[in-house]
Amino acid sequence: MTVKILLVTGDAAESLEVLYPYQRLREEGYQVDIAAPSRKKLRFVVHDFEDGFDTYTEKPGYSWPADLAFAEVDPADYVALVIPGGRAPEYLRNDAELQRIVRHFFEAEKPVAQICHGPQITAAAGVLTGRTSAAYPALEPDVRAAGATYQDGEAVVDGVLVSARAWPDHPGWLRAFIEILRTKTPAS
């Protein structure tokens, strides 16, 4: 039986925050399905940090197909959830189907990895209250407004929730998430 992980994203997601966990989790032996508002070719972006800029810069990134639409997702088919950042969470957080999916993972206490702007989605789904989460530092007020404690760290673990600030945190973030997966839901 194939053990499946769901990755939820959309246009303007950060390329590295989608493709790194996608490939790393496949390397571990998991099937990773990408869900978006609709089945289509998604267009990601690259956020970079440049001297002299007060915030990140954005450039066109990779394209990748969505395997299924949020409305097609039965979250019971998946053992874990990955929520990348970038600008996609700004509009994805309003999607009722995505909120349904996210709530399932938290209610069932399944592992969830979120990074960068990903907490905008979990906040909108109402599941961050009482938790501790990292996020892109500019989102600290949003995390607090959602009733959570903000922690500035590369791999913040709160039960089965693993969060990070941005793509430079990938090694620690995915290492912590994979440790939880190997314990709770190994690929084989």
Image (cartoon, grey):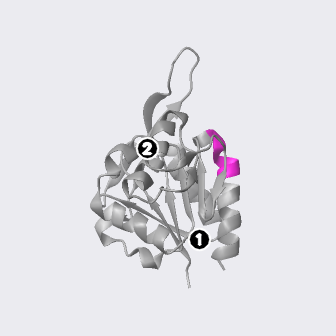
* Res. 153 mark: none
The reply to whether callout 2 and callout 1 are in contact (CB within 8 Å) is no
Write the start and end of the magenta stretch as one range.
168-173
- Can you give x and y, in whole percent of width and height, for residue 15 in the image? 49, 44
The N terminus: image quadrant: bottom right
Residue located beneath label 1 in the image: 30
The percent coordinates of residue 6 (x first, y second) are 47, 66
**On the picture, is 36 further left or further right than 139?**
left
Question: Residue 106: image x %, image y %?
Answer: 48, 67
Q: Is residue 171 magenta?
A: yes
* Residue depicted at 45% across the width and 60% down the height: 127
Q: Earlier in the sequence, mark 2 or mark 1?
A: 1
The residue pinned by badge 2 equals 145
Residue type at mark 1: give it.
Answer: Tyr
- Residue located at (47% from left, 37% from top): 141
Task: Single out the residue that lies furthest toward the top.
Answer: 52
- Report the amino acid beneath label 2: Ala
Residue 162: image location, x then y, percent: 61, 56
Report the residue at 42% width, 64% height from top: 102
Asked whether residue 32 is drawn in magenta, I would say: no
Can residue 31 be seen here? yes
- Front position among marks 2 and 1: 2
Where is the C terminus found, in terms of image quarters?
bottom right
Q: Is residue 65 left or right of residue 118?
A: left
User: Which element is circle 2 on?
Assistant: helix
Can you say whether 183 is above or below 49 in the image?
A: below
How many C-alpha atoms fall within 10 Å of the one at disc 1: few (<14), some, or many (≥20)? many
The quadrant where residue 38 appears: bottom left
Give me the C-alpha separation between circle 2 and circle 1: 34 Å
